[in-house]
Image (cartoon, rainbow, N blue to C red):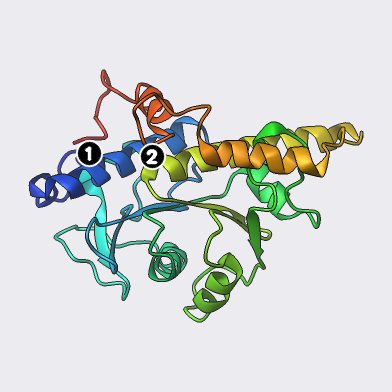
Amino acid sequence: MSLHAVNPSAPDAHPTERQVREDLAAAYRLVAYYGMDDSIYTHISARVPGTKDQFLINPFGMLFQDITASSLVKIDLEGRILDDSPYDVNPAGFTIHSAVHAARHDAACVLHTHTVAGVAVSSLACGLQPCNQWALQFHERVVYHDFEGIALDADERDRLVADLGPTARALILRNHGLVTLGRTVSEAFILMLNLERACRVQVAIQSTGQAAYPVPAEVCEKTARQYESGDSTREVGEADPNAREWRAMLQRISPPRASSFRD
């Protein structure tokens, strides 16, 4: 299987769609780079610009490290593939991502992982704890959805959306994994990277058998608001607080490589 131009129509996509494809392919490569992938499972989706019912997702069967802009599959909320891709998509991925994209039009990107630390924290009755700086980004801003089995049942979508609510950008799927929502691909990825780090630190703390040093509630809220403002990371004159870090992240996967994510 060639890693280049799996979907021959993609290179001719509108420039705004092409940019989203490149960002999404980069996010797949970065998830693999940081060890947050799970073989051919889990998913990242991005809304096709200018649409409410179309999104891009990975071809089922391709490793995240091999995803390219042109290999992404365009699909609608009914599960119909809208381009000439030779691939289908993971049904569980369709269930979760179609539910979120249909309900949350502010979610340009939805990222789902099954990492060891993320699944561990999702399986704890206490959930994510405010025990480190990364976790405080999500203080009172993470929501939970109970495990119902592998996400193959369409009727689960209503319950997932109800648990997600109208504003949350971090969702913990109990006994399953993590989900982040971003207004851009870069935001969804950076949220997930920080949520994953928060889980890793929590598991490390809990493994010691010692109690975490408590952070006062007002400091937790202050820290969460500092993250939300983006003032500590935004470059002068730039609206997107994630842009500086995203550009740095792209250097991790830029050529020279056997295959560029932009192909």
Q: Is residue 162 left or right of residue 182?
A: right
**Label 1 belongs to which residue?**
3
Q: Secondary structure at mark 2?
A: helix
Tags 1 and 2 touching, CB below 8 Å: no
Q: Residues within 10 Å of mark 1 (few under 14, many from 20)?
A: some
Would you name the residue on which mark 2 appears?
27
For the residue marked with disc 2, what is the amino acid?
Ala
Measuring from the top left, give residue 7's x and y in whole percent.
Answer: 15, 51
**Residue 200 at least partly seen:** yes
Give the percent coordinates (x, y) of residue 80: 25, 72
Which mark is in front, 1 or 2?
2
Spot occupied by residue 71 in the image (x, y as percentages of width and height) = 23, 47
In the image, residue 211 sits, relative to residue 83, either above or below, namely: above
Q: Nearer the viewer, residue 107 or 259?
A: 107
Q: Position of residue 226 (x, y in %)?
A: 60, 36
- Compared to 21, does 55 lie above or below? below
Q: Amino acid at mark 1?
A: Leu
Q: Quick check: 83 above or below 220? A: below
Q: Residue at x 35, y 52 (%)?
A: 61
CA–CA distance in space, label 1 to label 2: 16 Å
Please tell me which residue is depicted at 71% across the width and 48% down the height of the picture: 120
Q: Residues within 10 Å of mark 2 (few under 14, many from 20)?
A: many
Assign a secondary structure to mark 1.
loop
Image: 167 above or below 14: below
Report whether 191 appears left or right of 102: right
User: What residue lies at 50% left-to-right and 75% top-to-bottom?
Assistant: 157
Query: Looking at the image, which residue is at 92% across and 33% down?
Result: 210
Closer to us: 240 or 12: 240
